[in-house]
Amino acid sequence: LALGFERDSVCMTDADNDTIKLDPMRSACPIANVLDLVGDKWSMLIVRDMLLFDKHRYSDFLASDEGIPTNILANRLKRLEQYGIIDKRPYQLNPVRNEYHLTAIGHDLRPMVMEMVNWGLKHIPGTGRQ
């Protein structure tokens, strides 16, 4: 998958070179566009859980300390999949249950996640303690 930009929208190209149009861009600013994709209160925590804590199942994310509500978790997983940041793989067929894994685009968020960790540890007292 790859992200690309057309005139007024963000586009993704999947593995089959099909173009998926996302929401219109507010501006050409890369920061604004990253925030539009993962800048809400929960998305980066889901990415963090996959990158740093090897969480992949719905119940794994629900068990995180932040206490994400179930409706928000379902919505964010769907959005992250739509944006090509994660993919969904069934691990059980009856009833169908899925695991979620980072795509290459999702793994490219690692440096940003690590910088957020470092910044938080440096500037926000009490972080990093359990």
Image: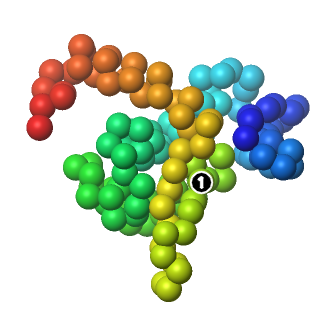
Residue sitting at x 43%, y 66%: 71
Q: What's the residue at 78%, 46% (across, down)?
A: 15
Q: Is residue 49 above or below residue 122?
A: below
Q: Residue furthest bottom?
A: 94
The answer to whether one can see residue 91 in this image is: yes
In the image, what residue occupies the spot 60% across and 23% down? Answer: 31
Is residue 42 visible to the viewer in this orientation of the structure? no
- Count of numbered marks: 1
Q: Residue furthest top?
A: 122
Q: In the rendered view, tell whether residue 80 sits above or below residue 69.
A: above
Residue labelled with disc 1? 87
Crowd around label 1: few <14 · some 14–19 · many ≥20 (10 Å): some
**Above or below 130: residue 115:** above
Horizontal side of residue 54 vs 16, given as left or right: left
* Quarter that holds the N terminus: top right
Q: Position of residue 38 (x, y in %)?
A: 53, 39
The answer to whether 77 appears left or right of 14 in the picture is left
On the image, which quarter does residue 57 sit in?
bottom left
